Image (tube, helix red, strand yellow):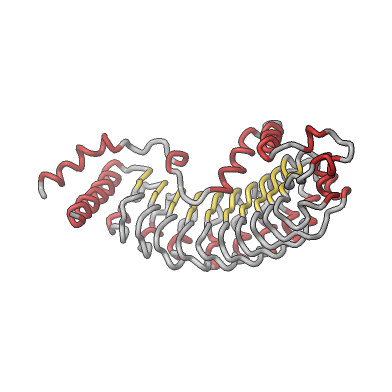
Amino acid sequence: MEKVCQFFRNNYVLANCEDAIYKKAFTLNLSHYQMAQVPEIIEQCETLMKLFLNQNKLTKIPSSIGSLQRLQVLTLDYNKLDEFPLCICHLVWLKFLNISCNNISSLPPEIGYLTQLETFWCNKTGLVELPAEIRNCERLETLGVRGNPLKKLPEAIGALSSLRWLTAEGCELTEVPLTLALLGDLVHLNLKGNVLRRLPRMLMAMQKLRFVFLNENRIDELPTRAQLEELRTLHMLNLSKNPISLHPDLQLMALRQTNLYVEQPEDPAVACDGLSSRASLNTQEQQEDQARGAGQDIDSSDWANSVRTSELDTTDESTLENNIEDLSVMLPEMSRFVTTF
């Protein structure tokens, strides 16, 4: 039965490719087909601007993909790739690239050829370092490297002047480069679940920064009140589940700054020290509501994107492409393969 299903899947994929060639389509969605290889015919889809290959069983990408020079969106997440497909670096007009959840431990220096790239996701790939050539991707606005054994970020990351969202959650970072201060447009910084020992000093210099997640690190150096005062422009600073998070002084500062989140003490009355008990009983959900409301003052999308990008592992085609044809429309086209079987 599996061979029969695979037969129909393969022919359905070919039918989609042929249809894209005939119609000179801009979009081709080949996700979720359990494909072990990309059909060779795809190199004839010269008009493509968006190609979805996520959620398959691909172990390699044919070099012919590099000839699709109009491509702007490429999704390869949740496949079985064990190296970065070098042919991707020929797609100089690419704006969105997702290679998450593969086994790609390194990126080639040629990644710097993708100078038009705006969004790059390489979450949970086993990545051990980001190449310095990432600096050439100057249009990059969103970068996700969560869940990788990264021990450091390159100094070159400071050259990404357009970066607004940086997610390096669940890595092995012991520190962050000072050049991070050069990211003048950064709004969201997620460094949750690393091994940082202190509050990154450059945060005070980042005027547009609004959401900072430093929870579940090893921060044992207590920030001063003056340092936290400088971070009042933040809508959320999460320092929970760090060695300092239950320190009485930090607990007191958290009551005075509603943008600061730490664990609540067992006895709020003790930590309150005369402050409003209502403030001491703020839950994380209440603080997040406050942050969400405050975020609307600068950009209504900032809070939503802050949460969404920090949790993203796979591609949601509905947000990238609104013109994918419904399956019920495509079924009649597939019927010709059924009748000839």
Res. 63 visible in picture: no
Q: Quadrant of residue 222?
A: bottom right
**Residue 185 placement, left or right of 327:** right
In front here: 334 or 159? 334
**Quadrant for the N terminus in the image:** bottom left
What residue sits 27% from the left and 50% below the top? 13
Relative to 112, does residue 165 appear above or below in the rendering? Answer: above
Relative to 223, does residue 273 appear above or below in the rendering? Answer: above
Can you give x and y, in whole percent of width and height, for residue 2 in the image? 21, 56
In front here: 331 or 93? 331
What residue sits 68% from the left and 51% below the top? 161
Can you give x and y, in whole percent of width and height, for residue 164 in the image? 65, 47
Q: Quadrant of residue 324?
A: top left
In front here: 32 or 196? 196
What residue sits 55% from the left and 67% below the top? 109
Res. 290 visible in picture: yes
Looking at the image, which residue sits at the far left?
Answer: 340
Can you give x and y, in whole percent of width and height, for residue 191 in the image? 66, 55
Count the numbered circles shown: 0
**Residue 161 placement, left or right of 8:** right
**Residue 87 placement, left or right of 195:** left
What residue sits 50% from the left and 62% below the top? 125
